[in-house]
Image (tube, grey):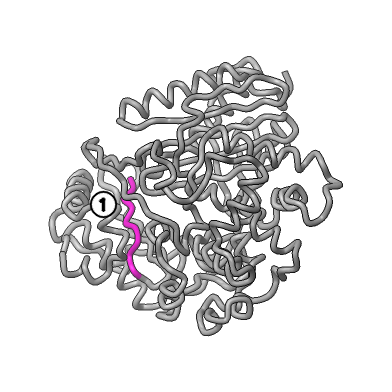
Amino acid sequence: MSEGAYPDIEAMVAFLDAEASALSDQGGSLAWGIFRRGGPTRSANADVPYRIASMTKSFTAAAIGLLAEDGLDLDRPFGRLVPELADTAIADRTCRQALTMGTGFTKDDPWADRMESMTPDELIAWLRRGAVATAPADTGYEYSNLGYAVLGMVAETVTGRTFTELVCTDILGPLGLTRTGFDHTDFPDLAPGIRVDLDGGLHPAELTGPGVFSPIGGMISTVDDIGTWMSAHLDALDDLEAEPGTLRHVLTGNQQGRRLMESQRSKHHTETLIYGYGLETRLDSRFGRVVCHSGGYPGYGSHMRWFPELGLSIVVLGNTTYYPAQRSVQNAVDAGWAAAIGTPDLALDRSTTSAPVPRYEAQPAQIQTVLAAANLVTDFDEAVADEIFSMNMDLDEPRVERRQRFARWARDHGLASGDAFSGEQLVMSSPLRGTVTVPADEAQTDPATITVGLNHLGQVQAITLGG
């Protein structure tokens, strides 16, 4: 068979069934669907609603696209579209930059994932405290939830309608997505979000309500409804003469790649990843164009992907915190492709090269905060944590569990209580992200790392242990 072979559906189903079983053993649940034009749907839990997290961004981009068709200038600065933003650091950024992840405001998970219910006034006050960009606008790809929250504010300002009402009325209604929305109280059968602790214990994830950060990831939906959403995009690509002003015309434009993200390569294929408007486009040597988006949230993880040349689409929804749905979809497709070309045991070992992004230099206060956070791993100080932690930190992992995890990791890597890290061990990859490298001992093949992420105000939003 050729490299472009149609993936073997049964191999994909078998892989997803195994993923569902593994997640069930952990205490969670998986919903998935494989949709083929002209063929039967294969699915599990297809009518169970899950939070779809950042897959919401495709709906936000569609709403902004409809407003652009009606006259919204995507290149008009935020500060002129929303006057209250005029004296903030994001005032000179634009809708087009936000849509394509080009504002220069960097990745703000997991802080932003806890901000859904914040009001516009609260966000404006927060920005006025001095939000920090990590790069000039339009100099590269920087995934940013903040930009999509501001897009929602723009939509409300120019229409006088709430963002959620706009999406529900102008997008969900016409497409018949009756099991999709923003308010969890409308979904009594919502799959419960779960946090799994270090020892495998299960904890219910907090449910948040609609607010200024809903445009980044606040939507709830089902496999069946997302199947319809994916089909609408496939139909749009088939209708290149769609009338301007229509949703179909908008969806066609949203699937065009606009900002280079990275390239991936294995011995058997290559992929080029480009961000469009609320969607990611991949040029895959096996399948041609691929369109997709992932989502991660406290209690949930999701991914949708479709293949225009194949008339194939797939979605996976899980209900544990940041469930790796993208990996599940990618591995399922790889398994289907390997089976189709007659080598079912073939595994694709990908290497990744990110598009270069110029970044501002880190300031002393940012460097000191990263080092202080890294030193908590070997010497946890409650007062220091109180001072530097963003509000999401204790919600994502209670202090007692975090301290236990830090202590186990330090012990496993030969670190003693009170061992301190210095600036010589720190590399700042951006003003808001730094990694401390711990020299490897004789039993290790790779050095251990502590990576600290800061939010836009320089507060600690994540401490990740590696190695």
Horizontal side of 422 relative to 454 (left or right) equals: left
- Residue occupied by mark 1: 397
Toward the viewer: 151 or 366?
Answer: 151
Query: Which residue sits at x=60%, y=66%?
Result: 155
**Whether residue 313 can be seen here:** yes
Q: Estimate the x, y position of residue 458 in percent, counting from the top left.
A: 37, 71
Is the stretch drawn in magenta largely helix, strand or loop? strand
Query: Which residue sits at x=43%, y=30%?
Result: 30
Helix, strand or loop under label 1: loop
Question: Where the N terminus falls, by quadrant?
Answer: top right
**Whether residue 260 can be seen here:** no
Residue 84 drawn above or below residue 108: below
Horizontal side of 152 relative to 394 (left or right) equals: right
Question: Where the C terminus falls, by quadrant?
Answer: top left
Residue type highlighted by circle 1: Glu
Q: Estimate the x, y position of residue 328 in percent, counting from the top left.
A: 49, 32
Image quadrant where residue 178 sits: top right
Query: Which residue sits at x=49%, y=22%?
Result: 15
Q: What segment is highlighted magenta in the picture?
A: 459-467
Horizontal side of 107 relative to 166 (left or right) equals: left
